[in-house]
Image (spheres, rainbow, N blue to C red):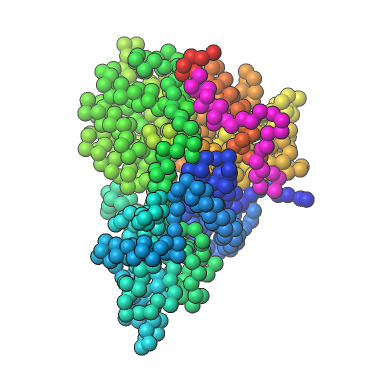
């Protein structure tokens, strides 16, 4: 069979979400963790519709005949193919939900509807509904004289088909207002038995519409486009932060791209709803499972005392390279340090920042912030530094999708404390993870630089795998300071010698290093490229990787999510092997290795190999010069490459196949890396 070596971006992402669903289906995963994966699958799918399907709809409006540059599909073709895939995945999701509910019943937890409870329990719940629900609910009847109510993004609504002898059919709508009462309602006389609040509302529709006959009913949920270009609609009369607040409000009202229904309802009603929301029937999905899976986390809380239903507890360990009882800054001056989250704690970095805020030798702290924790110790240290009279320059990226409100709030606090806050560049996100601490020493200026692969977020540092380099290398510090200085001027740096900095000094340098590996092979040597990233879609880099494969360069890639390149295609990508690792922790670190042995070049950074990262964002990758740290990166990559528990091999047709131990010992890389972190933290041989 002849295969193309290109994969469509949207379909590749759906393959990734399928791997998440596989974790919910996997009997080797503890039951309550399978619930988490099921909820993650749904939230991922929500964002896919809001961002990717929304973007494709916008492209159709601009140019319906345009074609993407890898598989030559039009926006409409991509949407149609994606919707077909999604329908298949949602059938699997519904089956997985039913299976998990059966297993939960064995643990004494059930989620039921009114068909599964006694008349006495039903009467109790109906009385509770009259007392506690009815005063808080609003009703809308849609007719010729009544306008259609606005349905908010991702909120659940009860929809009723109403009729009387005197009037034609109408549609009744009730917002289920999940924030006003508990989502899980306990069913009396049955311990561990619950009914969802929206199902209770749906059952009690006759009480809400007493003068109508209910001819049909369903729960409905709209997903709206969230792909809005904040810069294209910028109003120069507004402060940029105020403008972003307006963008957030506007996003909530963008056009629907999907409608979900909890059960079948007559086609005429669906057509009416589609006409109102300007949807096609292919954008309507009917499910057997609940429309919102977030209640599964509440069920997990009910089972916390059953430790066997969860992953074994793991806690980030101390780095063997640092003594927290000594100055972190002084230790970094002596040697570079690489932290690996979540296996190692983020605490040394937080302590370094806090120390810098109080160190009289520190004159300035410059930092880029993309996503922060709700109670951010990073911000606390920056505020303290400013209050201590230090120059604190902070770039807060207000265009960090779905974190805009949080970042707006933090930017206000930083400004009140006296920090100099800037908001990124016009038309370009600043996605780099960069911190530069400048100290005035007796012998001159000293830079302590931190460059990472993940956000400065204490919560995600326990859930995502990320790398954080802390170094006093003068050359790196100077280039990092120059990069930040350019940002303060609203510009981007256009020349670097050590760092890789997008948009001008990353893609081209990666291309040069791939060319170097090609040259080695053509000169009779061996070429090796090892890359760990979250996404690969940059056509320029993909073409160069194909060229390298054809030249005989061995290429090993760990790509967690989107991967628009297919390895193993005869005559094109024979020398490219791609795997994906999906497990307990979200793989988020980026590692680039070019060459082997003493000549190998190592980098970590914030950039995936996607066009948005290489050409439309400010990204920073740092070289690793310390030999011990290079060896650590090599170990991390090797362990992940040998994983036969969480890894899947990509096939030439773009599908992924689970690795099955074939006589060898089972190896789950994330477990191995945590065991190693515990061993090193306790100085075990």
| Left or right: 607, with 201 as reference point | right
User: Relative to residue 88, is residue 301 depicted above or below?
Assistant: above
User: Relative to residue 200, is residue 559 depicted above or below?
Assistant: above
Q: In the image, residue 152 lies at what x, y percent? A: 36, 61
Q: Residue at x 48, y 32 (%)?
A: 312
| Left or right: 23, with 190 as reference point | right
Q: In the image, residue 580 lies at what x, y percent? A: 60, 39
Question: Looking at the image, which residue sits at the far top?
Answer: 442
Looking at the rendered image, the quarter that the C terminus falls into is top right
The residue closer to the viewer here, 136 or 77, is 136
Specify the quadrant of the image occupied by residue 511: top right
Residue 258 in view here: yes
Is 674 magenta? The answer is: yes
- Which range of residues does the magenta coloring cover? 650-679
Q: In the image, residue 459 lies at what x, y percent? A: 39, 36
Specify the quadrant of the image occupied by residue 602: top right
The residue closer to the viewer here, 444 or 636, is 636
Q: Which residue is drawn at 22% across and 34% down?
A: 417
Is 308 magenta? The answer is: no
Specify the quadrant of the image occupied by residue 457: top left
| Left or right: 289, with 366 as reference point | right
Q: Which residue is drawn at 64% across and 53% down?
A: 71
Residue 497 in view here: no
Q: In the image, residue 35 lies at what x, y percent? A: 48, 46
Exactly how many numbered labels are in the figure?
0
Q: Residue at x 40, y 44 (%)?
A: 302
| Left or right: 139, with 553 as reference point | left
């Amino acid at each position: 069979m002849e295969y193309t070596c290109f994969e469509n971006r949207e379909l590749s992402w759906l393959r990734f979400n399928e791997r998440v669903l596989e974790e919910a289906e996997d009997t080797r995963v503890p039951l309550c963790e399978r619930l988490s994966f099921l909820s993650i699958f749904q939230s991922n799918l929500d964002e896919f519709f809001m961002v990717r399907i929304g973007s494709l709809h916008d492209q159709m409006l601009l140019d319906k005949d345009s074609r993407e540059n890898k598989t030559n599909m039009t926006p409409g073709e991509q949407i149609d193919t994606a919707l077909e895939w999604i329908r298949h995945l949602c059938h699997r999701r519904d089956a997985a939900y039913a299976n998990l509910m059966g297993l939960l019943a064995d643990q004494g937890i059930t989620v039921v509807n009114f068909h599964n409870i006694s008349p006495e329990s039903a009467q109790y719940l109906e009385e509770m509904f009259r007392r506690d629900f009815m005063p808080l609910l609003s009703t809308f009847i849609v007719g010729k004289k009544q306008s259609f109510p606005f349905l908010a993004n991702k909120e659940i609504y009860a929809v009723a088909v109403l009729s009387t002898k005197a009037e034609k059919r109408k549609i009744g709508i009730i917002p289920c207002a999940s924030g006003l009462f508990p989502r899980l309602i306990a069913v009396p006389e049955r311990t561990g038995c619950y009914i969802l609040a929206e199902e209770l509302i749906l059952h009690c529709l006759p009480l809400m519409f007493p003068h109508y006959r209910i001819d049909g009913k369903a729960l409905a949920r709209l997903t709206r486009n969230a792909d809005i270009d904040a810069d294209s609609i910028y109003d120069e009369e507004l402060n940029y932060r105020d403008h972003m607040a307006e963008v957030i409000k506007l996003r909530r009202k963008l056009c629907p791209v999907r409608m979900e229904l909890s059960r079948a309802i007559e086609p005429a009603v669906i057509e009416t709803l589609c006409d109102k929301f300007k949807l096609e029937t292919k954008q309507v999905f009917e499910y057997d499972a609940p429309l919102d899976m977030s209640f599964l986390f509440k069920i997990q809380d009910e089972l916390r005392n059953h430790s066997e239903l969860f992953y074994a507890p793991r806690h980030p360990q101390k780095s063997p390279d640092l003594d927290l009882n000594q100055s972190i800054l002084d230790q970094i001056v002596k040697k570079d340090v690489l932290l690996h989250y979540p296996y190692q704690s983020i605490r040394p970095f937080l302590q370094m920042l806090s120390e810098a805020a109080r160190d009289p030798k520190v004159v300035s702290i410059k930092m880029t912030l993309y996503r922060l924790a709700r109670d951010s110790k990073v911000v606390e240290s920056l505020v303290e530094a400013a209050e201590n009279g230090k120059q604190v320059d902070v770039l807060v990226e207000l265009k960090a999708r779905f974190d805009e409100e949080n970042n707006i709030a933090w930017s206000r606090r930083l400004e009140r404390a006296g920090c100099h806050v800037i908001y990124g560049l016009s038309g370009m996100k600043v996605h780099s993870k960069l911190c530069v601490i400048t100290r005035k020493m007796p012998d001159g200026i000293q830079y302590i630089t931190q460059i990472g692969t993940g956000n400065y977020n204490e919560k995600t540092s326990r859930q995502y795998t990320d790398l954080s380099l802390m170094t006093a290398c003068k050359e790196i510090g100077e280039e990092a300071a120059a990069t930040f200085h350019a940002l303060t001027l609203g510009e981007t740096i256009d020349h670097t010698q050590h760092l890789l900095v997008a948009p001008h000094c990353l893609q081209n340098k990666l291309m040069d290093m791939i060319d170097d590996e090609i040259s080695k092979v053509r000169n009779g040597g061996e070429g090796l490229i090892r890359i760990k990233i979250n996404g690969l879609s940059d056509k320029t880099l993909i073409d160069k990787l194909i060229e390298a494969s054809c030249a005989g360069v061995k290429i090993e890639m760990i790509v967690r999510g989107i991967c628009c390149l297919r390895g193993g295609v005869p005559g094109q990508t024979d020398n490219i092997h791609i795997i994906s690792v999906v497990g307990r922790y979200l793989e988020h670190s980026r590692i680039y290795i070019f060459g082997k042995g003493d000549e190998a070049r190592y980098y970590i950074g914030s950039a995936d190999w996607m066009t948005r990262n290489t050409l439309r964002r400010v990204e920073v990758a740092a070289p690793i010069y310390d030999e011990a740290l290079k060896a650590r990166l090599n170990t991390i990559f090797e362990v992940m490459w040998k994983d036969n528990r969480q890894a899947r091999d990509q096939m030439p047709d773009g599908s992924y196949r689970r690795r099955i131990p074939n006589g060898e010992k089972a190896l789950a890389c994330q477990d191995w890396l945590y065991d190693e972190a515990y061993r090193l933290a306790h100085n075990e041989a």
